[in-house]
Amino acid sequence: MKLSATKQLLDLYKEQSALEDYQSGVPRWCTGCGDNAILTAVQRLCRDEGLRPEKTVFVSGIGCSSRFPHYMKTYGFHGIHGRAFPVAEGVKMSRPDLTVFVNTGDGDCCSIGAAHWIHALRYNMNMTVFLHDNQIYGLTKKQASPTSPIGTRSNTTPRGSYLDALNPLTVSLGVSNVSFIAQAVDWIPETLYEIVKAAYHHKGFSFVRIIQRCPEWLPKSLDPWLQDPERVQLLHHANGLQISQGLSRVYKNQVEHDPLDIHRAREIASNTDIIPVGILYQNREVACYEDTRHSGALRTVEAIKKNFNAELDKYSV
Amino acid sequence: MTTKKVTKKAGKKTCTTLKEHIVEIISDSGEGAQRCGQSLGSIAARMGNGIWTTEIIPAEIRPPARSVAGASGNRIRIGSSYITNGGDETDLVVAFNEQVLLGRVNARELKPGCIILLENMWRSHNDQNIVKSYTEAYERLIKAGYKVVEIPMEEECLKLTSNAKRGKNMFALGILCYIYSFDLQMARDQIALTFGKKEKSVIDANVELLEAGHQWAEANIDFRFSIPATPSGKQQISINGNTSLALGVMASGMDICAMYPITPATSASHYLSEAFEKVGGIVHQAEDEIAACAFAIGASYAGKCTVTITSGPGYSLKQEAIGLAVMAEIPLVVVNVQRGGPSTGQPTKVEQGDLLTTIYGSHGDAPKVVMAPATIEDCFYSVITARRIAETFNTVVVILSDASLSSSQQPFDRPQFSESWMAPPIDQSPVPAGAKPYDWDPVTGIARRFIPGQPGGMHTVTGLAHDRDSHVAYDPDINQEGLRARSLKLAALQKTLLPPEVFGAPMGDLLVIGWGSTKGAIEEAVEGLRAEGKKVASINLRFLQPMQPGIKEIMQRYKKVLTIETNWSDNPNDELINEDSRRYSSLATLLRSRYLVDVDCWTEVRGQPVKPRTIRQVLLAKLEK
C-alpha cells in the first residue's frame, strides 16, 4: 500500500512518545547520584520534543556519567576516556540530520579531554553537551578531579588536594566562537529541565555544566549550597529563563542577566561562593562548523567521476 | 643496472645513447631546484621515458644558505623503459652552490666520475671566504675525479631578469633539456602547465630563461645524451605517492578525511583540501592526532567509512582510538606514511619501522588489517581496496606507505574510473525485528552493523566487552566469544587473498622477501643477478595482516630466505649478537614466528631508499655464505 507523503507526515505528527520509549535498562548509578536527575530530565526532553530514537545519538567518554547512553533507547556511542567530543563531531559532520548529545564528566571533559573541549567550543557544532560535574573521579574510586575544590581529601590527595579548582564556566567563556553556556544543579529539577530544553533548542554547541552530588565519595561537599538557598543564584531574563512562582518562594537570590552580555556572564561565572544557575551566555549568531564545511556540492557519482578525471588530466604525461 | 653506451658523432659534438641516467638538481632551499627537477621528470615522462623522481628535502624550512646539510632539490632517474625505483648513485648533478654539493658527495650519493654542472658565481664573489671555499671545493672535486663543468648561471640569468635567484632553475632546465636531447616544445608546454595558475608574463619569462639555458648549452657544452624512449602507448599520469593516496580517497567514495599535520603525510591532505572539497568531500584538520582518529571513527560510525592520514608519531597517538574501532567494529581506514623513528626520528626520511606496532599495537588483542602499497600506483588502488575491506568486515584497515613513496614520482597507466570503487550509500532501512547489532557469524565472525537512522537498530556501541546486543558483558564466555569473532574476520579475509607472485627463478638458492616501497629496488637486483645465472627470486607482500596464502610453500622452494627491509635488525657480526640476542627485522620476525622457517634479514636505516646495487651485494654475500 502506497501512502501519500502528507498522510505520512500527519501520522508522524500524531505519533506520541512515552518516557518508556527512551528508557533502556536499569541505571547502575548509586542511589542519590546526580546522574539519575540528569537522565530523567533528558528522557523527559526527548519525550516532550518527540525526538525520533533512531535519529538521536548520545555520545559519551568514560566515567560514571558516560554510562548514560546505555540507559537511553536511542543510538549511543560509549567511547574512550576524554574523546567524546571528537567522536560526536565526526557523527555530526557525517550526519547533520542526526540529533547529537554528549555526556561527559569533570575528568573526561576538563582533564583528559580538555584539549578537545576547548576546540569543541570553538568548532561550535550543533550538539547539546552535559558536563556531569561531581568534582571527583567516581568510577576509579575517589581521586581528585580538576574541579575538586582545593583541600578535597581523596585517595590521591589524602592530605587534601593542592590546587584551586578549574572553573569550567570561565574557561568556556574564554573560548572564541562560544555560543551557549549554562549551569544547572541536580537538586533543582525544574530549572535543570528548563536549561536542558533551552540548550537543546539552541543551534550550536550548547554547553551545560551540571553541578551534581556524589553521595558515595563526596556526600557532604555540596551541603553548604543545599542547606542555604541564598547561595544559589537564579539567572533570569526575557531572553533566558523565566522563574516560576514556586521556585521563587525557595530561591530568593535572583538576578536579571541578559545572556548576550558575555562580560557580565564572565563576572557571574567567576563567583564561586554562590552557584549561579541559568543561562550565562547565548549567542545565536555564531556559525556552526558543519554548516561552514558542508559546501552543498552534490556527491553524485557523476560529479565525483568528472572531478576525478579533471584531476587526472592535470597529471597526464 | 649497467649503462649501454653508444657514441655517435653529431657534427662536432658527440651524442651518447644511454639506457638510463640519474640526474640531480640541488640548491639552497627556496631556489627552485625542486621545481626544476619535477619539470625535468615530467618532460622526460612526456617523451615516453620511464622516470622515478625523488625529492631531496632538508629537515628545516629555511636552512642557512650554502650549507652542507641544506641541499634541496630533486633526483630523477630517467630510463628507456619502465623504472621501478630511484636506482643507484647519481650520474649528473646540477648544483647552485658547492656546499650543497659537498653534502651529496659526503653522503656518497654521486657515482665516481659523475658530471657536475656547477654555478661559478662564487669564484668571483665579494666575500673572500666564499671564494676560498669554492675554489677549495672545486679542486677537491677535480682531484676526486668528477667531471666538473662551471656554468655562469647567475651571469647569464641577469641578462634576462633582475632576480637571477628566481630564474636559475629554468635556465638549468634549459641546459638539461639540451643535454638530454629533450624536445624544447615539450619543455615549453610543461612550463605552461607548471605555472598554469600564474599570469602569462610569468610563463613567458620562464620560457625565455629555458630557451636561454638551452642556447647557452648548445654553444658551450661539448657532450650530449640521448635516452631513447619506449612509450607505453597507454595514457599515463605521473604523480607522487601522497597524491596517489589522495586520489584513492576520492575514487573510493569516502566523504571525510580527518587529519592533523605531520611530515611526510600532510601533502596528501593538502591535495585533498583542494581537489576533494570541490565535490563536497571534507578534510577536517583536527586539534590533534587523537581527535583526528576519534573524529574519523565518529563519522564512520554514523556514515560511510572515513579515512585518517598520519605518520609514525601520530599513529602512536591514535592507537587507543584504533583499538576502540576494532572493538566496536567500526570501519576505518588509517594511512601511516612511515618516517624514521622512534620519537621524532627523521621526519623527512624513509623507514619501514612501524610494521610491528601496527600489527600488534593498541592494547589487548586488536586484530586489524595491514596493507602495504609497493608502488605509487599501488597507493591509489590500496585505498580503494582498504575502504572496501573496512566496510565488508567492519574493521580497521591500516595502509603503510612510507616517505619514499610519498615524495617520489612515477608514471603509471591512467586509472579508468569505476563506479564499483565507490562506497555504497549507507543503509537506512528498518532493522528486522529481533536482529542484533553484533550478530556474529559463527564461521566468519562478521556481523552486519546498524547505522544511526535505521529504525529499530538503536543500541549503544561500546569499547567495553559486549554481547551480541552490545550490552556490557559481565559473563566471561561473552568476552571469549567477542574476541573470537573479531579474530575470525581476519581469517575470513585471508581466504580471499591470492598468493604473492614470484619474481624470478621459480625455485633455487635464494628467495628475497620484501614489503612496501623496496619492491622496485629488490626486483632490479634480482633481475641483474638472474641475468648472471643466479637462482634467485623475490616476493613482495601486499598484505602483512592477514598474510597471503602460499608463502610457506614458496619459501620451501629455495635454500635460503632473506628479508630486505628499511627497519632495524641487529647485525649478527656484532660482538654481542648471537641467536639468543639478535633482534630480527619486522617482517623476518613475523615470518619466523608464523612459518618456523629460518628467515634471515638484512636491513639498513640510513633514511634513504635502499639502492639496487646495495641489495645486489647483500644477495651475492648471502648466496656465498
Image (cartoon, rainbow, N blue to C red):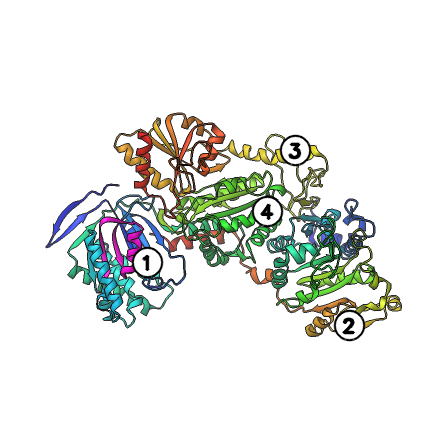
Do the CB atoms of the residues marked 2 and 1 lie less than 8 Å apart? no
Q: Is residue B289 magenta?
A: no
Q: Which residues are magenta?
A: B90-119
Q: Earlier in the sequence, mark 4 or mark 1?
A: 1
Quadrant in the picture for the C terminus of chain B = top left
Residue position marked by numbered label 4 in the rendering:
B320
Label disc, if present, on residue B481 of the rendered structure: 3
Measured in 3D between alpha carbons, the distance from the residue under mark 2 to the one under mark 1, in whole angstroms, is: 69 Å
Q: Amino acid at mark 3?
A: Glu
Q: Secondary structure at mark 1?
A: helix
Q: Which mark is residue B68?
A: 1
Q: Chain of mark 2?
A: A
Residue toward you, B127 or B42? B127
Tell me where residue A205 appears, x and y as whole percent.
66, 62
Q: Return the mark for residue A109.
A: none
Q: Mark 3 against mark 1, which lies toward the viewer?
A: 1
In contact (CB < 8 Å): disc 3 and disc 4: no
Residue at x-position 63% and y-position 30%: B442
Left/right of residue B309 with respect to residue B210 in the rendered view = right
